[in-house]
Amino acid sequence: MFIFAPFIIDNLINLIKKGEKYMNWIKRLWNYFTTYEKIWYASTILAMTLLIIFCFEDVLEIEEGSRFIVLLAICSIIDIISSITCELLISKQSRWNFIVSLALVQTSEFIIFLINGQWAMAVVSLVYWGIVSTISFINWTKHKDHLQEELTKVRKFTVKQNIFIVLAIIAFTVVGGFLLSFIPGEEEQYLDAGLTAFAMTNGLLILYRFREQFIVWFLYNLCEAILWIVSGQYILLVKNVAILINSTYGFIKWTIYIKTHKRESTKLSFIDHAYDDEEENENKEENENKRNINYDNKNTLIKNDEQSQAIPKTVSSSKTKKEKTNTKKDKTTNKSTQNNSTNSSNDSNKKN
């Protein structure tokens, strides 16, 4: 027993350390959400849970006698909880909503559509939303906030862009509804086309981080709520009401972020401009210094060349001077010898 005591103590210490890490992670996750977000999330999950318990088939849209009733129930519950989680993370400008969407929402919806025989919706869920979620996560990761990395930089449309989006949605709804009217047994074709237009537009706006995606998503859920009311499925309105509330909250939150960070961006742009001016001045000074250095180097080289050329001149001039002096000396010596010789000759003549 005493032999295994150190081993047991070490394992207990490791478990305590791991427990502390998990507790710190849970605390950070808990503090990540505001009080309002916690209340909204908890109340929505509670409402959906109660509806699933008491109105199982209506909420989860499960047909009677389905062979995959258990799998459908599990996937539907996962879809509801993960969709609400994605909604909350989008309003918080968190890029991790796309990971939740890929891992849970799209997977569970793909299974549900396959079991129900909705092949077109299954392809849209897997291909379109899978591609959009992947690219959106990459794009949001590239545009982190410079102060808070958990946030993503978001932006808004201009008036012209808003008008263009509205006209595009209307055109798609009219054309799509007209084409769907040729399908036999199709009811509420224009509402169905409008929902499709809103859903696809919402995906593109989320991809490019535009605030107006909340407006599109708000209209989508409003149209879907109208569809549930028309079909008499009032129980399904709970999810739409929760999303409408969160879309309003997210729109306000993104708007506040855009306004505050627009001021910061103008400040930063002014600072960046000042830094650019300083850099330009520094570059000018460096270029001038380089020019002066090059000019000095050229002058020194010229002087050196002149000096090098002047040295042989001085040498040659000194040589010529020496030669001249030597010639003068030779001349004087010659004259002296001639004089001496003449004097000696004269003396000899006198003697004679």
Image: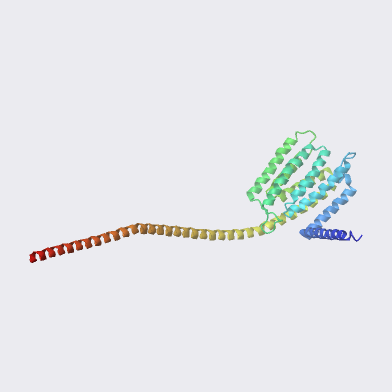
Can residue 205 be seen here?
Answer: no
Residue 178 is left or right of residue 5, and the answer is left
Can residue 126 be seen here?
Answer: yes
Quarter where residue 117 is shown? top right
- Rendering coords of residue 102 (x, y %): 76, 46
Residue sitting at the far front: 352
If the image is split into quadrants, where does the C terminus sit?
Answer: bottom left
Q: Name the residue rendered at 87%, 49% in the picture.
A: 51
Residue 347 or residue 108, whichever sits in front:
347
In the rendered image, the vertical position of residue 320 relative to residue 160, given as above or below: below
Quarter where residue 189 is shown? top right
Q: Which colour scheme is used?
A: rainbow
Residue 341 or residue 170, whichever sits in front:
341
- Rendering coords of residue 210 (x, y %): 68, 50
In the rendered image, the vertical position of residue 24 relative to residue 97, given as above or below: below
- Rendering coords of residue 290 (x, y %): 47, 58
- Rendering coords of residue 137 (x, y %): 71, 49
How many marks can you see? 0
Residue 160 is left or right of residue 68, and the answer is left
Residue 228 or residue 239, whichever sits in front:
239
Residue 195 or residue 322, whichever sits in front:
322
If the image is split into quadrants, where does the N terminus sit?
Answer: bottom right
